[in-house]
Image (cartoon, rainbow, N blue to C red):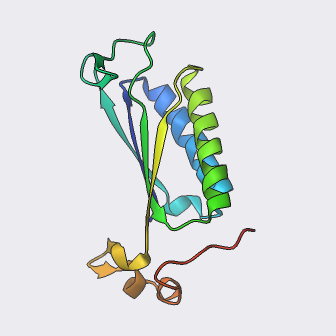
Amino acid sequence: MPCLEITMPATSKSIREELVQRLTTAFVTATSFEKDIFSICFLEYQEGQAAVGGRLCHGNDDRPLLHLNLYCPRLTRSKKQLLVRLLTEAFVVAVQQRHWEPVIHINEHPYDNVGVGGQLLSDAYPECAARKFYYELSEA
């Protein structure tokens, strides 16, 4: 189950709603996964609770700590390239801050490394068990 954790300054509910819509669309477009299995968690911090370059982050004038941490099955390089571009574009548009470009980490995993409902994902879903331990999704 793909999951995106977003570390960013505290923001309004309307911006978070916009982020959810745009980032979900970007993820589905780039990966071809169904949107129902994609989740997002916001890890927001208050002014002065994060630092970049040895300086505390203060308000919208600074370039704040922006980190997207994506946990997902292994993707092809071309899908990752598209995904990083689309997630960055979606984020910048949603927060309406041109200088707010997030760092994105993609943490890939085989289905044998995810537990759902007390079982490995590869045991819970036969279609996952049929895939190789590390696999490449089709380019289409």
Residue 21: x percent and y percent?
A: 58, 41
**How far across and down, in percent of the image, does residue 78 sit?**
68, 59
Q: How many marks?
A: 0
* Residue occupying image coordinates x 47% and y 88%: 129
Q: Quadrant of residue 60?
A: top left
Q: Which quarter of the rendered picture does the N terminus lie within?
A: bottom left
Please state which of residues 102 and 93 is positioned toward the viewer in this rendering: 102
Looking at the image, the residue that sits furthest to the top is: 61
Identified at 61% across, 50% down, the residue is 83
Residue 123, how many percent across, how many down? 38, 87
In-front residue for pair 136/120: 136
Picture coordinates of residue 55, whole percent (x, y): 29, 16
Compared across the picture, whether 25 is left or right of 40 comes to right
What is the quadrant of the C terminus in the image?
bottom right
Residue 39, picture quadrant: bottom left
Q: Is residue 70 above or below residue 122?
A: above
Q: Residue furthest right?
A: 140
| Residue at 42% across, 31% down | 66
